[in-house]
Image (tube, grey):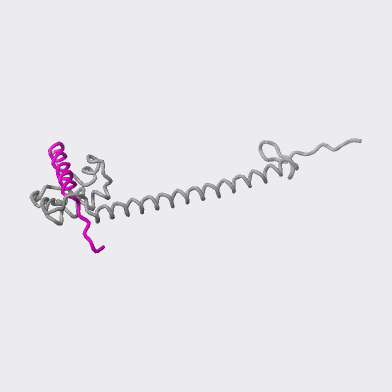
């Protein structure tokens, strides 16, 4: 991609506010998933913005035993960001949403096809069993599968 996907100034302020609130509330730096949950943003989308903010120095990623945690870096660098989302961020978010929708649709179709073939196989087996039952196919057996001897007609 030729154009950088950078969050807007407003988005950066919102992300930093989320990091600050969670760090204050939990007494530990939050991870991306926690900030995403607090802000109601998909973690994948927030991850793109966080990577850019880390690259700018606005945020710092601190690795611990459980993964990467976010800390506030130089918050004044937010002012270097453009106001508004910018075309690159909007384009990236739209293409991500479209790819996600296509993957979900493909999975939904695959499960529907698998379900149809399973049903078809089960119904054909039931039809065969019903035909055998109606025609009296095969020797008669008792509950234990032992053959039942037919009484001979005296006539």
- Position above or below: 150 against 50: above
Task: Label the magenta part by its dominant secondary structure.
Answer: helix
Residue found at x 24% / y 55%: 87
Image quarter in which the C terminus is found: top right
Please check the rendered image and state whether residue 131 is part of the magenta-colored stretch, yes or no.
no
Q: How far across and down, in percent of the image, does residue 12 sit?
A: 16, 48
Horizontal side of 34 relative to 112 (left or right) equals left
Horizontal side of 152 relative to 73 (left or right) equals right
Q: How far across and down, in percent of the image, does residue 148 sit?
A: 75, 38
Residue found at x 38% / y 50%: 101
In the image, the segment drawn in magenta is 1-26
Residue found at x 8% / y 50%: 76
Horizontal side of 135 relative to 18 (left or right) equals right
Image quarter in which the N terminus is found: bottom left
Residue closer to the observer: 120 or 73: 73
Residue closer to the observer: 46 or 123: 46
Q: How far across and down, in percent of the image, does residue 46 sit?
A: 23, 48
Numbered disc total? 0
Furthest residue in direction right, as rendered: 155
- Quarter location, residue 4: bottom left
Residue closer to the observer: 89 or 135: 89
Residue closer to the observer: 34 or 42: 42
Please check the rendered image and state whether residue 19 is part of the magenta-colored stretch, yes or no.
yes
């Amino acid at each position: 991609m030729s154009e950088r996907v950078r969050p807007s100034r407003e988005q950066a302020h919102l992300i930093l506010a989320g990091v600050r609130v969670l760090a204050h509330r939990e007494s530990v730096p939050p991870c991306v998933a926690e900030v995403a949950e607090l802000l109601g943003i998909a973690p994948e989308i927030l991850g793109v913005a966080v990577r850019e903010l880390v690259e700018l120095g606005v945020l710092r990623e601190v690795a611990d035993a459980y993964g990467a945690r976010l800390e506030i870096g130089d918050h004044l660098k937010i002012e270097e960001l453009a106001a508004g989302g910018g075309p690159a961020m909007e384009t990236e978010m739209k293409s991500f949403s479209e790819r996600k929708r296509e993957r979900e649709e493909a999975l939904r179709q695959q499960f529907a096809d698998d379900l149809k073939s399973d049903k078809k196989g089960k119904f054909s087996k039931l039809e065969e069993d019903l035909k055998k039952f109606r025609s009296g196919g095969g020797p008669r057996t008792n509950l234990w599968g032992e053959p039942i001897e037919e009484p001979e007609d005296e006539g």
